[in-house]
Image: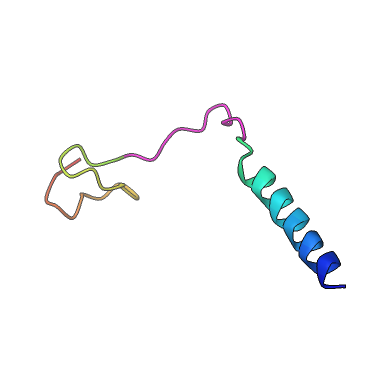
Amino acid sequence: MIFKIISLFLVFMAVLAMFGRLRFPKLPGKTGMKRCPDCGKPLIGKGPCSCGDKA
């Protein structure tokens, strides 16, 4: 019984690992997040960066 539980657990973990390694293609028109040219923080919205840059 223990062997069956352990083997099912290992199979389940292997399946999860396979799904984790999948690389989904990027969608057309989807661009990366804008980043501040000075500090590299992601910019959300149209406001200035918190580092003081006017990007």
Quadrant placement of the N terminus: bottom right
Residue 50 coordinates in the image, percent (x, y):
18, 55
Question: Relative to 45, is 31 above or below?
Answer: above
The residue closer to the viewer here, 38 or 45, is 38
Q: How is the image coloured?
A: rainbow
Give me the residue at 13% from left, 45% from top: 53
Residue at figure coordinates x 11%, y 51% from the top left: 52
Which of 41/12 is in front?
12
Is 16 above or below relative to 38?
below
Q: Is residue 33 left or right of residue 8?
A: left
Give residue 28's quadrant in the image. top right
Q: Main secondary structure of the magenta part?
A: loop
* In this picture, residue 18 sits left or right of residue 34: right
Q: Position of residue 6 (x, y in %)?
A: 77, 65
Q: Magenta includes 40?
A: no
For this orientation, the residue located farthest to the top is 28
Q: Residue at x 34, y 50 (%)?
A: 44
- Total label count? 0
Could you tell whether 8 is left or right of 32 in the image? right
Q: Give the residue furthest to the left.
A: 52
Residue 48 picture location, percent across and down = 21, 49
**Where, quadrant-wise, is the C terminus in this rendering?**
top left
Magenta range is: 24-34
Q: Quadrant of residue 3?
A: bottom right
Seen at 68% across and 45% down, the residue is 19
- In front: 19, or 39? 19
Q: Residue 47, percent across and down?
A: 25, 50
